[in-house]
Image (cartoon, rainbow, N blue to C red):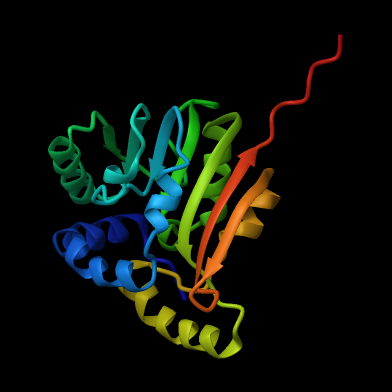
Amino acid sequence: MADLGEDELRHRWDRYSSRYDKDIALLERLQFAGGREWVCGQATGEVLEVAVGTGRNFAHYPAGVRVTGIDLSPAMVEIARTRARELGLDADLREGDAQALPFPDASFDTVVCTLGLCGVPDERAAIAEMHRVLRPGGTVLLLDHVGSHHAVVRFGQRLLERLTVAMIGDYQTRRPLPLLERAGFELTRSERRKLGTVERVAALKRPAPPSSP
């Protein structure tokens, strides 16, 4: 399956943006219930949300965090800006690529990504960027649909994936957790649900070793 080009992917998400909240609502209740709360409730300090979408996480952040959000689709970002204003959330929201984040090294205390890595053409590059912009000791918090460990379910996911990748670049069978560990993160919490098709992950960017005297 060939990935959609960046311009085409942006165009398709722009076109889909007005329907996204309605389409995802039922799926969230059935498959991802409680996931956004689990992820956002652990966020602290300066927070970067990658693939912020329409801002569906905004209502779940604890008081006192400072949110920066980035998304490939400018239409999704505009919806997120409206949602932030309605909630009274002072968020810095901008268009950008998860594979090349426009922030200096060690800029954030927390990186959040919910239902986003499944749609990034190169999820390894996105995870490497998350690691780069996190401060040592910072946390990455993820929620995503992943490839099931049940063979029959995974076979069905692979069939569905042929359609969703062609439509909006959305993969059904990825699993970010092993990639986090290879990128230098230390797993602190993980939960796998719904026949192994949904995973919640918290991982730590290891603090830098103390310098020699």
The answer to which quarter of the image holds residue 116 is: bottom left
Residue 152's place in the image compared with 142, above or below, is below
Q: Residue at x 30, y 73 (%)?
A: 167
Q: Closer to the camera, 151 or 129?
A: 151
**Which image quarter is the C terminus in?**
top right
Residue occupying image coordinates x 62% and y 40% = 204
Q: Is residue 173 left or right of residue 74?
A: right
Q: Position of residue 24 (x, y in %)?
A: 26, 67
Residue 89 visible within the image: yes
Q: Up-down: is 90 above or below 177?
A: above
Q: Quadrant of residue 93 in the image?
A: top left
What x and y, as percent, mark residue 146?
A: 51, 69
| Image position, residue 17 (x, y; %) | 19, 58
In the image, farthest residue toward the bottom: 152
- Which of these two is toward me, 203 or 16? 203
Which residue is pictured at 21% across the width and 63% down the height? 20
Q: 204 and 181: which one is in front? A: 204
Question: Relative to 5, is 149 above or below?
Answer: below
Residue 102 in view here: no
Instruction: Name the residue at 55% across, 48% down.
Output: 127
The image shows residue 9, relative to residue 84, as above or below, that is: below
